[in-house]
């Protein structure tokens, strides 16, 4: 089976270049080409490709927002991000959001082909300039998530996750259809299980584990 692809870039010339590059490869099949982030999300939902090749800067919905949405929706599609060499901060954000590969646009086309094949095979592909910090953050986040999962109930994990995103107790209660007092009880139990005291200490703990 060929590797099914959706390609997304807002520059028509680059998009055409990507199309020609992958059409020449017998083990690759392009399912859709997209000019903005919203189109990319719709194509991923419609076609369920193996790999999405995504420009980091897209109109309507940028690359990071596409990644956030795909993570929220639990999409199994793996993402290769096309980035500028100066975008190290964007890259560091993209890895924890689910990007499995990063290729700088100034790299030769063969690099992108190799990256896509590696990512499709279940591996990570990161340029050396960004790999160390990005992988460190990813590993710390995954290790922290394992610790949390081994200690907290699913509901407690959900409340901690929403707390890390800055939601006050009232909004957490509304989102989960529970009372505010129940949220407070859960937060007390979470604090006891993680051996920290208070909301601020919980946030510091989550940040230290790479969860916030």
Image: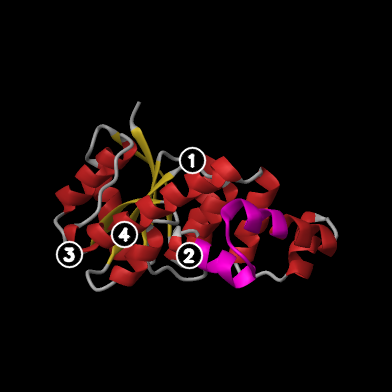
Looking at the image, tell me whether mark 3 or mark 4 is earlier in sequence order.
3
Nearest the viewer among 94 and 167 is 167
Instruction: Tell me: 197 left or right of 207.
Output: right
Q: CA distance from mark 1 to mark 3?
A: 28 Å
> Does the residue at mark 2 contact the one at mark 1 (Cβ under 8 Å)?
no
Which is more foreground, mark 1 or mark 3?
1
Residue 76 tag number:
1
Residue 12 in which image quadrant: bottom left
Residue 106 tag number:
3
Which is more foreground, mark 2 or mark 1?
2
Residue 136 visible from this viewpoint: yes
Q: Residues within 10 Å of mark 2 (few under 14, many from 20)?
A: some
Q: Residue at x 17, y 52 (%)?
A: 109
Question: Label 2, on which residue?
Answer: 207
Q: CA distance from mark 3 to mark 2?
A: 34 Å
| Residue extent of the magenta highlight | 188-205
Residue 11 visible from this viewpoint: no
Residue 134 tag number:
4
Looking at the image, tell me whether mark 3 or mark 2 is earlier in sequence order.
3
Q: In the image, residue 41 lies at what x, y percent?
A: 52, 54
Looking at the image, tell me whether mark 4 or mark 2 is earlier in sequence order.
4
Nearest the viewer among 44 and 73 is 73
> Does the residue at mark 3 contact the one at mark 2 (Cβ under 8 Å)?
no
On whether residue 193 falls in the magenta region, the answer is: yes
Q: Is residue 119 above or below residue 94?
A: above
């Amino acid at each position: 089976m060929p590797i099914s692809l959706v390609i997304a870039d807002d520059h028509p010339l680059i998009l055409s270049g990507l199309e020609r590059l992958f059409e020449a490869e017998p083990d690759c099949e392009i399912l859709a080409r997209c000019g903005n982030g919203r189109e990319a999300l719709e194509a991923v939902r419609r076609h369920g490709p193996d790999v999405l090749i995504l420009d980091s800067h897209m109109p309507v919905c940028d690359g990071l927002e596409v990644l956030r949405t795909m993570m929220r929706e639990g999409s199994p599609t793996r993402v290769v991000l096309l980035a500028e060499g100066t975008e190290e901060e964007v890259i560091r954000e993209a890895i924890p959001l689910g990007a499995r590969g990063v290729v700088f646009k100034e790299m030769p086309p063969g690099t992108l082909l190799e990256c896509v094949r590696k990512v499709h095979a279940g591996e990570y592909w990161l340029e050396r300039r960004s790999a160390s910090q990005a992988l460190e953050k990813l590993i710390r986040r995954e290790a922290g998530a394992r610790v949390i999962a081994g200690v907290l109930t699913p509901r407690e994990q959900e409340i901690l996750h929403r707390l890390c995103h800055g939601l006050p107790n009232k909004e957490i209660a509304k989102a989960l259809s529970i009372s505010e007092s129940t949220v407070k009880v859960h937060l007390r139990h979470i604090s006891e299980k993680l051996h920290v005291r208070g909301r601020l200490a919980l946030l510091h703990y989550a940040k230290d584990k790479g969860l916030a």
